[in-house]
Image (spheres, coloured by chain):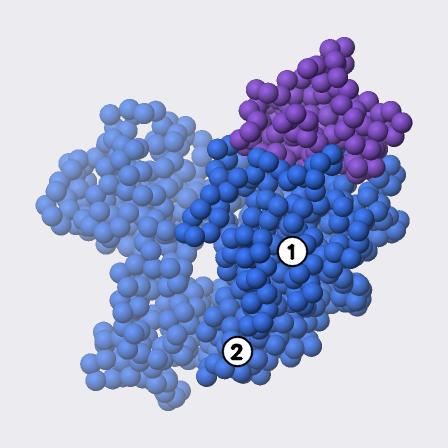
Chain colours: A blue, B purple
Amino acid sequence: MEKIIVIGNGMVGYKFCEKLRAKAGKNQFEITVFGEEPHPAYDRVHLSEYFTNPSVASLEMAPRSWYEENDINLISGEMIIAIDRANKTITSHKGTTLSYDKLILATGSSAFVPPIKGVEKQGVFVYRTIEDLDAIIEYSKKTKKAAVLGGGLLGLEAAKAMIDLKQETHVVEFAPRLMPRQLDNAGSDALLSKMEELGIRLHLNKNTRNISGDGKITAMEFADDSILDVEMLVISAGIKPRDELATACGLAVGQRGGIVVNDLLQTDDTDIYAIGECALHKNFIYGLVAPGYEMADVVVNQLIGSNDKTFKSYDMSTKLKLIGVDVASFGNALCENETHKPIVFEDNYKGIYKRINISEDGKRLLGGILVGEAEAYNMLLQITLNGMALPPNPEDLILGSRGGEETKMELPDSAQICSCENVTKGDICQAIVDNGFEDVAQVKACTKAGTGCGACNPIVKDIFNEQLAKMGKVVKNVICEHFDYSRQELLDIIKIKKVKDFDQLLDEHGKGDGCETCRPLAASLLASTWNEMILEKGKDAIQDTNDKYLANIQKGGSYSVVPRIPGGEITPDKLIVIGEVAKEYDLYTKITGGQRIDLFGAQIHQLPDIWEKLINAGFESGHAYGKSLRTVKSCVGSTWCRYGLHDSVSFSIEVEERYRGLRSPHKLKSAVSGCRRECAEAQSKDFGIIATEIGWNLYVCGNGGSNPQHAVLLAGDVDSATCLKYIDRFLMFYIKTAEPLNRTATWLNKLDGGIDYLIDVVVNDSLGIAADLEREMQFMVDTYKCEWKEVVNNPELRKKFTHFVNTEIPDPTMKFEDMRGQKKPVEWGA
Amino acid sequence: MTQEIAEYKTVKAEDVTTWYKAASMEAFPDNGGAAIEYKGLQIAIFNFSRRKEWYASQNLCPHKKQMILSRGMLGSEGEEPKVACPFHKKTFSLKTGNNLNGDECDLATYPVKIQDGYVYVGFSH
């Protein structure tokens, strides 16, 4: 077996092992990999996530067990100190000596620390390893003000980390702009204003001369004699290739560092390769992970004997989200030494800057820059890399936000879609054709596309959809065998054709007799549109059991009764009525999670009598049985609470009474908290409201349940009227567009454009439908009636509430037993 | 439980010995069902008015042994008329009583006839 030793267990070293094991025969190679850090290889690209989730495991490329399973000898925490090329051995600092047949140097790089006086002081850090991060986190506990030296990619990442650590954050950059290698001045300005909005203070054109302080840093002094007081400094000014081992054993290195390699990634010893950030290829160090992976691939190909692949200069295009701002730069972004015609789009209000560089003859795209909005990145990159012909109006490529669709173009099969894993469009399409995949997740698992940095995920999805469409396999979202429409289409039909009856809907727009899927769905749509009593005019036949009897069916066939208690506020007199009714009908009582009282164990014939008593005492239906608004939970609010900012109880009652009875795709829950202590748990609701000093924050699309999800902020510091207006629009938009039985959180997760789009529609009225949504909601509010009151007062409807139609006796099989002094139904089938 | 599932046995039209007069047609909602009691048995009768058809089956759901099927929802699968149980949405053919989801046991079904505005169910004992 050939002995392979890899020095360096970073991302590229790891990827090399993965690729070699995947491509080579099982017993072809013996692989040993040395890492000087204590952890197995981790994802350095997403290092800043460590500040919000300090878990090494979640960053690891693969757990330690992966190395065992793949028969790779991983030796962590051990540094190689010497290579003996004559005897082909390596020696570690612990004295371990091993021989190799082929040696792979994947030693990476260390942080470049500029020679500034005072860099050795306490409180000065580099941003490179998990140990660095741990030290920064620990030190930040004592500091309030931090600076980052370097306004490049990594520097801005580090600045984000400082914000996460609650530091007043400064960024110091030598150049006159941010990300000088990727952005031009205007692009930098757009990014700069976004950074400043986030509270990051930027200092450009600053040459740091001295780091002052007595033992620990207290200030930075600049060449222009200005001074910045800081308690901590993170240096992120570039990288320095780790070439010291190579130098020591006599391999050629570049003048400014880096192990010299040829197109096969061989050093000047053909048994030693260098890959990743330590390798100097054609006088260039690639400080990105994708070219490192490509290098690993080239070496693996040689080792397994297929020699045809060489490393060619690699595209350095990047797209990333920097502190929530999309930034992309592709092809020849700056075109500093190339004649070109730029097209520039700037929106200073939204902080968007886009520039594309067109060749002199107007035929090709050379490169460009996108700041603030980078959806077109993948498409533009492909056009650039593949030398595709430009559309007649190339400005359409970046002016999508002006209105209409951004121009999309058909990519060739050779187009590289995922640069991390080197997957082409052809690979993706082939995987779909060969395996019959109908889920994009299967495609990603099979091809590995999108599993690296994830930037290509949107285009992978587009290609997936296109390919399915080509195969005639677009899976349309139809309701069931009876209606060839989506929920949204059926709702439009009901509205436009003014359909009020299910049989009519079925006869004119469907087929067959309906089923347990489309009937309740149509019932909900009819209710959300016309708000007619749900049990009248034959509509009882299309209601789910709970809606059909306006009560929740329980084990054994009894029902539960839940009167509305808006905001959880109830008088002692009303409590007594509930107690009396429960006693009279022997009902099990329990306080619900939504601050009201549930009465269980009512038999079907008792329901109208029970409700008659409750309605006479001033109660109304709580709609606990419907896909509709349940409760609006509240804390006690400013009337009693010493922390309360506003009267959350009054507002929650107003909200609950406004939306009571509203039928929707799924149940709706809400809450109002009187201050940010959030006792009402509003952030786990479909819509939740939290008092601020000057108004309310409105959160939407949260839920508890099997997949808990936090609600997200829709609008901040709004007054009560605006808050209700936004809820009107939000709920109606949800009712109109959600798929069947999708709660608001699921709906948002599927919504193209996510929360930003939702804010645009609800707050900025980007679709111009806000007035319609408000009017439709007002109609629902104005036509609300208590369903139980109607049943109680309608002898025809009351008649339905019986178990047998040929005898007065109740269901003789219904049985209860005692538990803690109350009743409970006997177990299923007992 | 007063009834065991074994007490419910499908009755074919030709084997009917007794036509029980259950209730007037109006007692059964359009496109819905209602239960009747007969000699300790609970029978669900369905008025599938959209198809102008009547069906009867045991009221007992064979899955969790609940007296509930008369409150189920009517519908069709292809040409087959069916009822969905309110508890767990299992569906049964109204014609044969067969479980259409292919797992639990089937329903016993009974012949129905309409005469002079009344609904009759056929039994063989």
Instruction: Kindly tell me whether residue A424 is visible in this rendering.
Output: no
Instruction: Report whether B54 appears left or right of A75.
Output: right
Q: Chain of mark 1?
A: A
Residue A631: x %, y % from top left: 60, 62
- The residues bearing labels 1 and 2 have C-alpha atoms spaced at a distance of 33 Å
**Kind of element beneath mark 1:** helix
Q: Nearer the viewer, residue A83 or A401?
A: A401
Are discs 1 and 2 located on one and the same chain?
yes
Instruction: Report whether A625 appears left or right of A72.
Output: right
Residue A702: x %, y % from top left: 55, 59
Residue A185: x %, y % from top left: 56, 72
- The residue beneath circle 2 is A637
The quadrant where residue A100 appears? top left
Residue A749: x %, y % from top left: 59, 53
- The residue beneath circle 1 is A610
Q: Residue at x 68, y 72 (%)?
A: A724
Q: Residue at x 69, y 21 (%)?
A: B109
Q: Residue at x 40, y 47 (%)?
A: A292
Q: Nearer the viewer, mark 1 or mark 2?
A: 1
1 and 2 marks in contact (CB < 8 Å): no
The single residue placed furthest to the left in the displayed view is: A95
Q: Amino acid at mark 1?
A: Ile
Q: Amino acid at mark 2?
A: Gly
Question: Could you classify mark 1 by the number of other residues whose Cα lies within 10 Å: few (under 14), some (14-19), or many (20 or more)?
Answer: some
**Kind of element beneath mark 2:** loop
Instruction: Report whether A50 appears left or right of A807.
Output: left
Instruction: Kindly tell me whether residue A129 is visible in this rendering.
Output: yes
The single residue placed furthest to the bottom in the displayed view is: A225
